[in-house]
Image (cartoon, rainbow, N blue to C red):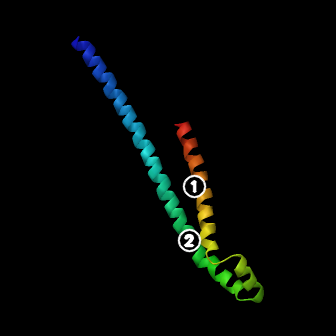
Amino acid sequence: MPLLAQLFATIFAQAGAIITAILTVLIGLKLLKITALATLYIATVIAFTAFVHPLMQSIFSSPYGQLLGLVFPPISGTVLTGLGLLYSGILLNRYLRSLIRVI
């Protein structure tokens, strides 16, 4: 009987270790996704502010640009950044899921 109890204890200990390792990897991947998305969002906002925003200001100063400014308000850059982040998040999620299938 003690031998059987020791066998079950060893089996359940190993199963617990495997489950803990899998959950740790999944939590790590979720943290990686969050960090990557936050970094990507900050990088796209900085790129928009540094490069695209001055270009848009020079375009919007013309009469045609004022009409264009009514169609695309200044907040549209942030919205486009958010949409780019959403698409990048979808691609990152697909990539990480393909990595999990390989493992």
Q: Quadrant of residue 86?
A: bottom right
Amino acid carrying label 2: it is Val
Residue designated by label 1: 89
Q: Residue furthest left?
A: 2
In percent of the image, x 47 and y 48: which residue is there?
29
Q: Residues within 10 Å of mark 2 (few under 14, many from 20)?
A: some
In percent of the image, x 63 and y 67: which residue is there?
80
Q: Earlier in the sequence, mark 1 or mark 2?
A: 2
> Quick check: 90 above or below 74?
above
> Quick check: 28 above or below 51?
above
Which residue is more in the foreground, 85 or 6?
Answer: 85
Residue designated by label 2: 45
> Quick check: 16 above or below 80?
above
In percent of the image, x 72 and y 76: which residue is there?
71
Determine whether, in the image, residue 72 is placed left or right of residue 35. right
Q: Residue furthest right?
A: 64
User: Circle 1 — which element?
Assistant: helix
Determine whether, in the image, residue 61 is placed left or right of residue 101. right
In percent of the image, x 61 and y 68: which residue is there?
79
User: Circle 2 — which element?
Assistant: helix
